[in-house]
């Protein structure tokens, strides 16, 4: 979310083109759960999953670790929906481990990558303080690296105040304790957020007018401290004044600011565009504080609640549109058409509401519930076995997600006949796919390094290019699609073949020319000899005549 | 005598061919290897990559990047360069080709993983979004205008001028119209 926002901001120009207002009517039977189900069903069809299948299918799993993927499992899990969390977790762990072997790890600048992934790990049932291992075999601690020790590499707030906000949310998912030798204290993070509060009571990435999204997110992060009596002393940058305030005073100001920003239909505008996501974030913020978003008088406008505001954007397929005007900043989200980001954030808002109505912990509070879910033993089902048996003899990276999820499940499952055989087959498959992935990466790097600039490709590069071509042809059709700019290799190869052919023709023609020259010289010599001989004969003749 | 003349003629012909070069190609091959050659008939666009704003905000720059290796003294990563426009080329395609041809580092988020359904440019020449403060990142301008959509959705026409410019202030420092906090 934090990232979406920045992306919006980084190209912030809005042309408002009014579109006809096509929204789906509110129904009396609507509950947070039924609204959420509509979104889930819509998203399932979006990723080609069957209505009874899992949303987190293999197509979806390829998105693990990305902004487009991680929020859906969080929403699903917080709604208590059964889904393929284990598969998601397995692929996500591989993703994190791979990224940790690179210099910037999850991101050089954006700490929010750690925060979003922390939430999806928790939602899928994993432990963010020991999520896979780094190259030295040490467990990866997303909480330490992404929050209290983030400053050891890059400031938590490098990307702006949202870095501090989401850092605090991640840190408080399980109320993680901060060790004494950590880079930041909790109070330091809270103080950073408070000090960015604008004069009108809210927060924004830049400028001095509050943005409902960021304001709502700041409230979500500060909510666990609302009842705290502690007074913070900080420089409030917007008014350049030393301020003494409790979190409650700061949050109350923010709520007043949000109340003023709410529009007549119950929704909000962010960066000039009336949209569903801002309203979703305000619902989540109020739920985090234990306020009922449907009855609090500050958030009812013309009889329209925040939920009414959200439902304006519902589409006939169950999904949600980003806005009902065309937003050129987000051209993928068309008015009157369900959009993935709008769906995921509304799913989260519905989860927050549903949890509140059922007396459960708030959306980002992942401490165990009083009625914790049972820890039933995992069973490697017949369908799983069939999936292993039907793996093709020649594996490609297309099977990466399937194999990773199956092996992870097998390792956690109860014993069964042939378990070892299945483990061996899956382990071998995983290693084989890892090799193909390495080969693809290396081939892409080789092309990038050896081929350019294309004009300077010469016969000297023949071996290099031939080797690249040979390795490419050794890949399966699916894996070949992972090689970027193959046309440049074809171009280089054609260029070399042309040069080679030119050389051969040149040599052959040169040889012919030499032969012709020799032929010519021989003939000239021969002619000369004949002439000399004729002259001699003639001279002899004359001499004979003279004698006579 | 006739044979001699023929031989001389043959030698001259071969020498002429050799001097002229023996690069013989089929039409397809010629098209393939000359696709990026600029001729009077070819449609072209101009691309440049600049980061001069970083020079004014050097104190905000990630200390690891404070070197001429990453930020050239004149801020020019790629001077205006002409590229042949292929059918259907987008701003992203041209950038992608230019950085490959010039061996400039680039990292982007593919359209599928981006929430906007378009390629999202994360870093060029090791300068990433947020590398120079929370409001920093890459923006592109076509013929002086900042387009309202992702670079892999902007299809180009003959003669257009594309600039990739690093901003340290949400576009304000590079003349992008800025709506921060407005429109309430």
Image (tube, coloured by chain):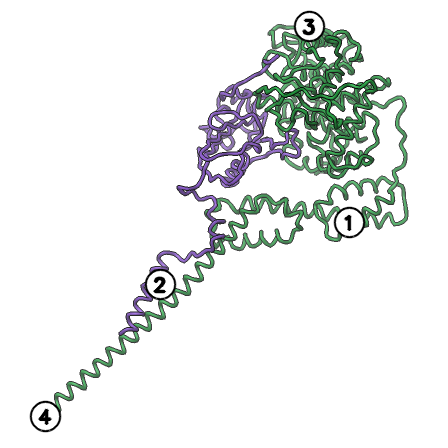
Chain colours: A green, B purple
**Residue A547 badge:** 4
Question: Going by the image, does A329 lie left or right of B6?
Answer: right
Residue at which label 3 appears: A244
The image quarter containing residue A189 is: top right
**Foreground mark, 2 or 3?**
2
Whether residues under marks 4 and 1 lie with C-beta atoms below 8 angstroms apart, the answer is no
Residue at which label 1 appears: A391
Residue at which label 2 appears: B14
Give the spatial CA distance, label 2 vs label 4.
Answer: 54 Å
Q: Does the rendering let one see residue A129?
A: no
Residue B123 location (% of width, % of height):
57, 31
Question: Label 2 is found on which chain of the structure?
Answer: B
Residue neighbourhood size for the residue with mark 4, other residues' Cα within 10 Å, grouped as few (<14), some (14–19), many (≥20) = few
Question: Going by the image, does A144 lie left or right of A155?
Answer: right
Identify the residue at the far bottom of this view: A548
Q: Does the rendering let one see residue A394?
A: yes
């Amino acid at each position: 979310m934090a990232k979406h926002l920045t992306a919006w901001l980084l190209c912030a120009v809005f042309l408002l083109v009014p579109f006809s207002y096509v929204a789906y009517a509110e129904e009396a039977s609507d509950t947070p759960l039924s609204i959420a189900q509509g979104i889930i069903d819509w998203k399932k069809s979006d990723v080609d999953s069957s209505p009874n299948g899992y949303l987190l299918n293999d197509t979806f799993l390829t998105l693990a670790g990305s902004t487009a993927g991680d929020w859906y499992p969080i929403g699903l899990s917080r709604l208590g929906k059964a889904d393929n969390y284990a598969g998601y977790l397995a692929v996500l762990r591989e993703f994190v481990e791979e990224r940790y072997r690179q210099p910037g790890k999850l991101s050089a600048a954006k700490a929010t990558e750690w925060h979003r992934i922390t939430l999806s790990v928790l939602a899928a049932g994993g432990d963010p303080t020991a999520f896979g291992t780094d190259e030295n075999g040490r467990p990866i601690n997303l909480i330490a690296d992404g929050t209290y020790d983030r400053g050891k590499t890059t400031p938590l707030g490098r990307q702006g105040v949202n870095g501090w906000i989401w850092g605090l949310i991640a840190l408080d998912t399980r109320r993680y304790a901060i060790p004494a030798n950590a880079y930041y204290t909790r109070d330091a993070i809270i103080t950073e957020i408070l000090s960015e509060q604008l004069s009108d009571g809210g927060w924004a990435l830049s400028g001095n007018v509050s943005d409902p999204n960021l304001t709502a997110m700041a409230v979500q992060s500060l909510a666990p401290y609302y009842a705290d009596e502690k007074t913070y002393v900080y420089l409030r940058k917007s008014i350049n004044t030393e301020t003494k305030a409790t979190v409650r005073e700061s949050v109350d100001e923010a709520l007043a600011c949000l109340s003023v920003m709410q529009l007549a239909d119950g929704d909000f505008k962010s960066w000039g565009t009336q949209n569903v996501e801002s309203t979703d974030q305000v619902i989540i913020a109020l739920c985090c504080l234990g306020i009922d978003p449907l009855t609090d008088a500050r958030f009812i406008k013309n009889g329209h609640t925040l939920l009414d505001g959200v439902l304006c954007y519902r589409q006939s397929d169950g999904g949600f549109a980003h806005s009902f005007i065309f937003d050129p900043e987000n051209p993928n989200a068309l008015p009157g058409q369900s959009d993935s980001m709008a769906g995921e954030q509304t799913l989260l808002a519905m989860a927050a509401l549903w949890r509140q109505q059922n007396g459960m912990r708030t959306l980002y509070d992942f401490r165990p519930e009083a009625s914790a879910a049972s820890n039933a033993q995992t069973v490697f089902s017949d369908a799983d076995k069939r999936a292993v048996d039907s793996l093709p003899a020649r594996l490609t990276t297309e099977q990466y997600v399937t194999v990773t999820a199956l092996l992870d499940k097998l390792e956690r499952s109860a014993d069964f006949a042939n378990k070892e055989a299945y483990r061996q087959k899956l382990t071998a498959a995983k290693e084989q796919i890892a090799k193909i992935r390495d080969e693809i990466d290396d081939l892409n790097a080789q092309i990038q390094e050896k081929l350019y600039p294309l004009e300077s490709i010469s016969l000297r590069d023949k071996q290099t290019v031939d080797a690249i071509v040979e390795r490419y042809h050794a890949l399966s059709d699916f894996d070949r699609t992972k090689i970027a700019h193959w046309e440049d290799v074809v171009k280089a190869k054609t260029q070399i073949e042309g040069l080679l052919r030119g050389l051969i023709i040149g040599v052959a023609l040169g040889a012919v020319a030499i032969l012709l020259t020799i032929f010519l010289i021989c003939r000239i010599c021969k002619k000369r000899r004949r002439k000399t001989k004729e002259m001699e004969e003639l001279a002899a003749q004359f001499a004979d005549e003279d004698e006579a | 005598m006739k044979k001699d003349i023929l031989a001389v003629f043959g030698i001259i012909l071969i020498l002429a061919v050799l001097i002229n070069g023996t690069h013989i190609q089929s039409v397809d091959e010629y098209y393939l290897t000359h696709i990026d050659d600029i001729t009077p008939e070819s449609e072209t666009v101009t691309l440049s990559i600049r980061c001069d704003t970083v020079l004014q905000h050097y104190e905000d720059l990630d200390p690891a990047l404070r070197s001429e290796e990453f930020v050239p003294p004149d801020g020019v990563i790629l001077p205006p360069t002409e590229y042949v426009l292929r059918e259907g080329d987008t701003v992203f395609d041209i950038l992608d080709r230019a950085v490959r041809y010039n061996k400039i580092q680039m990292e982007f988020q593919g359209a599928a993983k981006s929430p906007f359904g378009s390629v999202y440019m994360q870093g060029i020449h090791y300068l990433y979004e947020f590398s120079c403060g929370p409001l920093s990142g890459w923006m592109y301008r076509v013929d002086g205008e900042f387009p309202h959509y992702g670079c892999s959705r902007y299809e180009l026409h003959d003669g257009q001028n594309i600039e990739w410019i690093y901003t340290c202030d949400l576009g304000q420092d590079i003349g992008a119209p800025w709506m921060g906090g407005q429109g309430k």
